[in-house]
Amino acid sequence: MRGIINKKGKLPKLNQKMKELLNTVLTRLKPEKTDIIDNFRKKVLDIIHSNRKYKNIGVFIGGSVGKNTYIKNDFDCDVFIQFARTYMNDDLSDILEDIIKETKIPYKRIHGSRDYFSLKYKGITFELVPVYKINTVEQAQNITDFSPMHVQWILNKIRNTNLQDQIRLAKQFFKSSGLYGAESYLNGFSGHVIDIMTIYYGGFIKLLEAASKWQKNEIIDIENHHEGENIIKILNKSKIQSPLIIIDPIQKERNAAAALSRKKYDLFIQKAREFLRNPSSKFFNITRLSIAKLKNKYHDNLIILEGDPLEGSKDVVGCKILKVYNYIRKQLKTNGFEIHVSNWHWNGKDKFLIWFQIDNLVIDNQFVQTGPPLERKFDCDKFKGKHPQHFEERNRLYARVSREYNNAISLIGHLIHHSYIISKVTSIYQI
């Protein structure tokens, strides 16, 4: 259960070609220094300190920015507004909204387990999250209260090491492979999990080498919270369903990788092996999906839908888009259409895409429905009453039934106006 941690977080011995590759990738990943984040933090603090009613409130820069593991031109900044426990009976979100109003910057209030806020300042998106300032795990009132403790744990582990850059490499690798994001519509690896794994194994390459040998299930307990114990028996059953169990360094009862699916776990192992066999910068390139690329790839019998998501937290909004995709896919199959390829994509910010490549856009206007065996007289009588034009074959009843839709484009055109779909997205239309 012990990790393969290099002393002082140094890279394992690499050949010159690998070193040059990783250094080249890092050159484009490392952000340029900016004072925008510090200026914004000061702006919020000045508002807090200038108003006597705002007492015992702090501002903590979290996320990858706070850990200095963020990637150039690919980050948002999490700002945790820390309230003292004297605010226990107050609505933290309402107080924070009053503070944000004084910045005179347009913002959105996003509903969640505790409402938070999103705004853009000098080209950077900031998410302001109200939390209680806690010193122990037991003092937390909400899962977000743990976040500053997680950031501080990472900072303590990577101080005086080169692990910030190792985490950047790992994070870009996961993003390029479509593995990044633990939201329930993605079921991938969260940034927090990537941080822990990179620290545990001592670097990016060591992480890939270990993952290439992972078996059906892996357990990482970086702080040895459960050393000598059977973790499977200790944790709640709901927390051990994922193929990877990572005991959270702050919350020992929590599996930080609980959202990970078997599909994403297996894909990471595959990608790790591919990179180690043939290292290349292509493993760090993120391809932006577009309608033109879909048309160029799939050509014939392709149906593409584009739409605008609802506003709200990414997890909730993404799940609604996923439900729309699954609903249309199910209806196509129910109506007899053979789907060759289908998928969907949303980057968490802009329009979403859903696409289907169907073997035949137009199918027979009728199909043969299978009925019950002849010995089941009661069921046969019901089937005959429903289908007067039935026939017998091989001791079973059958009936030729007319389809409501035999054109996939017409069916989807009908579905996108269904109340189930229009309740889950702002708009959806066929390209």
Image (cartoon, rainbow, N blue to C red):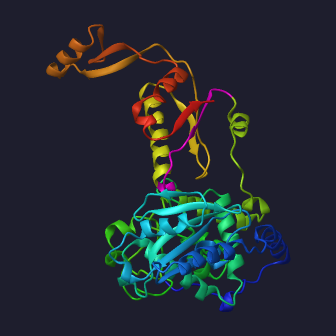
Q: Is residue 181 visible?
A: no
Residue 218 rendering spot, x and y as whole percentages: 49, 72
**Quarter holding the C terminus?**
top right
Q: Is residue 413 left or right of residue 235?
A: right
The answer to whether residue 108 is above or below residue 370 is below
Name the quadrant containing residue 194: bottom right
Q: Residue at x 51, y 29 (%)?
A: 338
Residue extent of the magenta highlight: 300-315
- Depth check: give the residue in front, 271 or 429: 429
Asked if residue 307 lies in the magenta stretch, the reply is yes
Q: Is residue 113 visible?
A: yes
Residue 182 rendering spot, x and y as whole percentages: 51, 62
Residue 111 rendering spot, x and y as whole percentages: 44, 57
The answer to whether residue 42 is above or below residue 281 is below
Q: Is residue 355 left or right of residue 376?
A: right
Name the quadrant containing residue 399: top left
- Depth check: give the residue in front, 55 or 377: 55
- Depth check: give the residue in front, 416 or 239: 416
Q: Is residue 295 left or right of residue 108?
A: right
Q: Residue at x 48, y 57 (%)?
A: 110
Total marks shown come to 0
- Seen as rendered, the residue at the extreme left is 378
Q: Residue at x 15, y 19 (%)?
A: 377
The answer to whether residue 422 is above or below residue 172 is above
Residue 303 rendering spot, x and y as whole percentages: 60, 30
- Seen as rendered, the residue at the extreme top is 389
Asked if residue 41 lies in the magenta stretch, the reply is no
The answer to whether residue 120 is above or below residue 156 is above
